[in-house]
Image: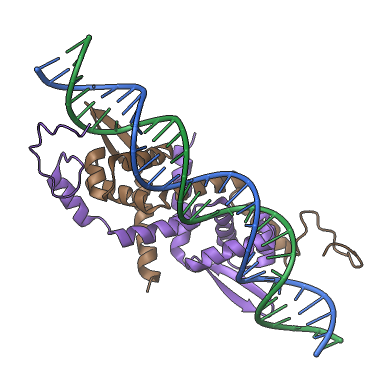
Chain colours: A purple, B brown, C blue, D green
DNA sequence: GTGACATCTTGAGATTTGCGCATATGTGCT
DNA sequence: AGCACATATGCGCAAATCTCAAGATGTCAC
C-alpha cells in the first residue's frame, strides 16, 4: 500500500489524510467549537442518553419537585437506582436537590433542559415511522 | 430486611417502594412520556453524547456539507474513525449522505439538531464556572 | 443514646462501546 | 478489463458504564 512512493507531489502539513478543500476545512476548523467545548456538550448529552435518566428528567418536568421515593415510584425503579442516576444528573447540574428533614427533594436546575427535551421530542416525532 | 413482616399496613399495588404523595405520583406517571418515548429520546441524546460525534456535527453545522476526508481533517480523526461515527449518526437519522462520484458528502438531516446544539451550548455556557 | 427511616455510597459482575487494523465494496480513469 | 482512489465494514481487545445488592451516612422520634 504505502511502499513505493512513486508519486508524492502533495506535501500535507497537517496529517496523513487527503484534503479536497483545504481552505474550507481551515475555515470550518476555526469557526466550530473547540475540543473542550465539544467535550462539555458531549457530557450534557451523555447524561441524558439513558432511558432511566430521561424518565427521571421528564418526571421532574411534570412534577416540578419530587422526593427520591416518589420519584422512584414514578419512574418504576428502586430507590437506590434512582439515587444513583440522580447523582449523575446532579454532577452535570441537570438537577438540584433541597433537603427537608430526612427527605431530599429534587427538581430541574436549568430551564434549558425542558427546551432540550421538547426539541428532542419533536425530533423523534417527525422522523420515526 | 423483608423478613418479619410485623407491620404491613400499606398495600402497595405497584411496587415495594414507599410513597409520600401517591396521587401526585399517579398524575405524573400519566402525563409524562412513556417508556418507549423515553428510549427514543435517550437514543438521540446518546448518539450526541460523545465528543467525536459532537465535533462532527458541529463541523457539519458550520460547513453545511463535507466529504469524509475533509470531515476527518476538520475534526482531526482518521477517515476510518470518522466513517464509523458517521455510521452511528446516520443510523439515528442525524446526518444524511449524498454520493457524488466516489466521494460521499455528509450533511445534517434535521434542523432540530442545530437547535439542540445551540441550546446545549447555552446550557454549558451559563452553568460552567 | 438507641432505633427507625430516607438517602447515599461502594464493590463486583455483565454488557456495551470505542479504537485500530485489515479488508471489502463501489466508483472513475486509462 | 485492470488499477487507483474514497469510503465502508468486520474483528479483537481495552476501557468505560449500567445493574444489582449490601453497607454507610445522616436525620428524626422517643
Residue A12 appears in which quarter of the rendering?
top left
Rendered-image quadrant of the N terminus of chain B: bottom right
Residue B120 relative to residue A18: left or right:
right
Residue B15 appears in which quarter of the rendering?
bottom right
Residue D24 appears in which quarter of the rendering?
bottom right
Q: Position of residue B80 (x, y in %)?
A: 32, 39
The residue lying at 40 percent from left, 56 percent from top is A42
Q: Position of residue A51 (x, y in %)?
A: 56, 51
Residue B69 relative to residue B89: left or right:
left
| Observer-nearest of A112 and D12 | D12
Q: Is residue B36 above or below residue B51?
A: above
| Observer-nearest of B76 and D28 | B76
Residue A22 relative to residue B97: left or right:
left
Residue B13 relative to residue A25: left or right:
right
| Observer-nearest of B31 and C5 | C5
Q: Position of residue B88 (x, y in %)?
A: 41, 40
Rendered-image quadrant of the C terminus of chain B: bottom left
Q: Position of residue A84 (x, y in %)?
A: 60, 63
The residue lying at 69 percent from left, 64 percent from top is A70
Residue A11 visible, this orientation: yes
Residue B44 visible, this orientation: no
**In the displayed image of the protein, which residue is found farthest to the left?**
A9
The residue lying at 43 percent from left, 62 percent from top is A112
| Count of numbered badges drawn on the protein | 0
Amino acid at each position: 500500500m504505502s511502499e513505493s512512493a512513486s508519486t508524492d507531489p502533495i506535501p500535507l502539513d497537517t496529517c496523513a489524510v487527503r484534503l479536497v478543500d483545504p481552505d474550507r476545512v481551515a475555515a470550518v476548523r476555526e469557526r466550530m467549537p473547540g475540543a473542550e467545548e465539544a467535550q462539555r456538550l458531549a457530557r450534557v448529552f451523555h447524561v441524558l442518553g439513558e432511558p432511566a435518566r430521561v424518565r427521571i428528567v421528564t418526571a421532574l418536568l411534570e412534577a416540578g419537585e419530587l422526593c427520591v421515593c416518589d420519584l422512584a415510584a414514578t419512574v418504576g425503579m428502586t430507590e437506590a437506582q434512582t439515587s444513583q442516576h440522580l447523582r449523575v444528573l446532579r454532577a452535570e447540574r441537570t438537577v438540584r436537590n433541597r433537603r427537608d428533614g430526612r427527605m431530599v427533594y429534587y427538581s430541574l436546575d436549568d430551564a434549558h433542559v425542558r427546551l432540550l427535551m421538547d426539541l428532542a421530542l419533536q425530533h423523534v416525532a417527525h422522523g420515526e415511522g
